[in-house]
Amino acid sequence: FSSKGKRKLPPSPAPALPLLGHLHHLKLPLHQTYHNLSKNLGPIFSLRFGTRLMVVVSSPAIVEECFTKNDLVLANRPRFITGKYIGYNYTSLVVSPYGECWRSLRRLTTVEIFSSARLNMFQSIRHDEVRLMLRRLYKNSYQDFARVELRSRFADLTFNNITRMVAGKRYFGEDEENEEAKQFRELIDEVFKLNGVSNPADFFPVLRWIDYKGYEKNLARLSAKMDSFLQGLIDEHKRDKSGNTMIDHLITLQESKPEFYTDVIIKGIIMVMLFGGTETASATMECAMSALLNHPEKLDKARAEIDNLVGKDRLINESDLSKLPFLQNIILETFRLFPPAPLLLPHEASADCKLGGYDIPQGTIVQVNAWAIHRDPMVWDDPTSFSPERFEEAGEVGATKLLPFGMGRRSCPGNGLANRVVGLTLGSLIQCFEWQRIDDGLVDLAEGISQPKMPLEGRCKARDVLHKVLTQPA
Ligand code: HEM
């Protein structure tokens, strides 16, 4: 828009303060604040933070514009400081700007990591991890109901799934007390905490010069530690090439095309899997189980469906999942009400474009409020109720209405893996145990958050099928 005066930006709230812009409007959780703002400003509005313009979109029609006609223009990511440290100087898949590097990584990971062939190859790991969780729960609950905490079990399961696929190692859970596992867990904990904090210096460059709160120094220190850990894993696999893990596959590719499959690229892929593929899936499992504990009749319906298909002599496996529509609908309904990434990931306009009739200048950050669309009464009947049945009636739901994995070329490539691991874990817990809440009160799934306030606890009692399978001679 050659003349700034002529452009028509999406509406914004008043007042905007000098320098700070709309910063004072922001309250956590952001998706809820944005939702409240959109009630007055409409389905597209803009905010200014320091030097940056941000546009927030919260209607299916404008989402469609974002990811069809403008998909290419919006395929960029803003260059936040975390991308430099956690994203290997903007070369990893999540933070890489749209261009040749991103295209090559996306092609590579589609084939080497996310293809059905690769997912099938690592299926035994997922089955094994779920069985381990069942066995541990069984220890306490084979005679009577026992109180169990689930958040940490889901976290251990999803992390071990990824670390076993990547490097053939388990680092999480009560048995993993060796030094390497402890070190890795501590490191992950620290990096997750720092990565989850939004950094004002991304919007106010002056704060970066003075390294406000030492944020960047901390990031640099942690990412160096993480890098040396991951390099250690790669070196280990280069010394012993007998494995069949993702690192081994990538090292084989490195031998034939060393200029692209560098160690940095491999480490970036590992980081992306650890960050993209763990908390998202475990939070979904926790929300789904919480909702089922609050709605025992849905849990019974899902169990009847599983018993009917799988019978009472074997455990559910991944190939059963596509034949269990009610279980699938429970997962969809969980994604609808509790999307783990309520604002997806930020996009950045690489050129001027138009959305909803407004001008969007090059460099604008575009955020999609999926959470608000998922709860919009114009889109969904009785939007706040947990009703998996709505998908039976609705048939195919449009991708602009239910978009937990985003849409368009930057949408999540891990959705197949996520659906498998969430489906298998939930299906197994439903099949193998009776469940009750710990008391009469409902599990607190407070509006606006993507995880219950407190780590989920429930009471479970093993069912005959688990007893039969675990006590059968091998
Ligand atoms: C319940 C599970 C998951 C949810 C809800 C989820 C959600 C998302 C969302 C919303 C995005 C951003 C889309 C956008 O830019 O608009 C994304 C991107 C991404 N996700 Fe996931 N994700 C999940 C699991 C996974 C898993 C298991 C992996 C890999 C192991 C993964 C890897 C990625 C990567 C690499 C990207 C960046 C893609 C790109 O920028 O080209 N995700 N995910």
Image (cartoon, rainbow, N blue to C red):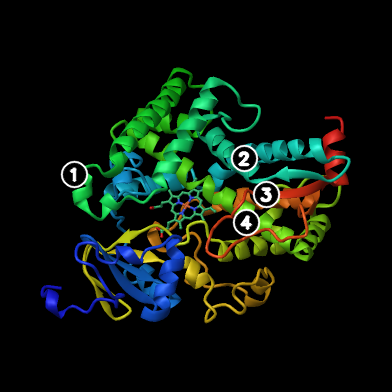
Marked residue nearer the N-terminal end (2 or 3)? 2
From the image, which quarter does the N terminus lie in?
bottom left
The quadrant in which residue 440 appears is: bottom right
Marked residue nearer the N-terminal end (2 or 1)? 2
Front of the two marks 2 and 1: 1
Tag 1, which secondary structure?
A: helix
Mark 3 is on which residue type? Leu
- Estimate the spatial distance between the alpha carbons at disc 4 and disc 1, rounded to whole Å: 41 Å
Tag 4, which secondary structure?
A: helix
User: Circle 3 is placed at which residue position?
Assistant: 424
Mark 4 is on which residue type? Cys
- Asked if residue 90 can be seen in this view, the reply is no
Marked residue nearer the N-terminal end (4 or 1)? 1
Mark 2 is on which residue type? Leu
Percent x, y for residue 421? 61, 48
Characterize the local packing of mark 4: few (<14), some (14-19) or many (20 or more) Cα atoms within 10 angstroms: many
User: Circle 4 is placed at which residue position?
Assistant: 287
